Amino acid sequence: MARVDVSGYQSFGQINDRLGELVGQVRDKDVSLERSLDLFEEAIALGSKAVSLVDTTDFSPEEEARLADSEADAPEKPSGADAVAEDGGPTGAVSGN
């Protein structure tokens, strides 16, 4: 498979817009499985590009403080055996039935 070129996407807005287009195309019932896989590959490449944008972003001191505040205000999510899914059921639990 050829590597997908995502170098033209330079912002999260551009990546988000393209991902929205990809979702719309995949939802089309007339799209072949092969085309859907190509779109999926592009979506993965766009996700990787987004991660690299985060890794290379220089935040101002004000932005860093805002991010730190928002992370401190976010409720902690339990993990492991004590985790509960948003629907109230356990996550990853195996039924004893």
Image (spheres, rainbow, N blue to C red):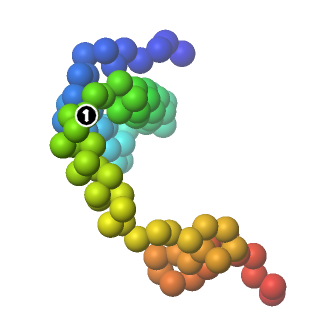
Quarter of the picture holding the N terminus: top right
Viewer-proximal residue, 23 or 91?
91
Which residue in the rendered view is the most extreme toward the right?
Answer: 96
Viewer-proximal residue, 76 or 1?
76
Residue at 32 percent across and 66 percent down: it is: 73
User: How many C-alpha atoms fall within 10 Å of the one at disc 1: few (<14), some, or many (≥20)?
Assistant: few
Q: Is residue 96 above or below residue 72?
A: below
Residue 49 in view, yes or no? no
Q: Judge left or right: residue 79 versus residue 6.
A: right
Quarter of the picture holding the C terminus: bottom right
Q: Judge left or right: residue 87 versus residue 90.
A: left
Residue at 23 percent across and 51 percent down: it is: 66
Residue linked to disc 1: 59
Going by the numbered disc 1, the residue's amino acid type is: Phe
Q: Secondary structure at mark 1?
A: loop
Where does residue 34 sit, x and y in percent of width and height? 48, 30
Residue at 40 percent across and 29 percent down: it is: 55
Q: Is residue 84 above or below residue 16?
A: below
Where does residue 49 sit, x and y in percent of width and height? 38, 26
Residue 95 in view, yes or no? yes
Which residue in the rendered view is the most extreme toward the bottom?
Answer: 97
Kindly indicate the quadrant of the structure image that contains residue 81.
Answer: bottom right
Where does residue 21 sit, x and y in percent of width and height? 24, 38
Q: Is residue 28 above or below residue 13?
A: below
Kindly indicate the quadrant of the structure image that contains residue 96.
Answer: bottom right
Residue at 33 percent across and 19 percent down: it is: 6
Q: How many marks?
A: 1
Viewer-proximal residue, 53 or 9?
53
Where does residue 27 sit, x and y in percent of width and height? 34, 48
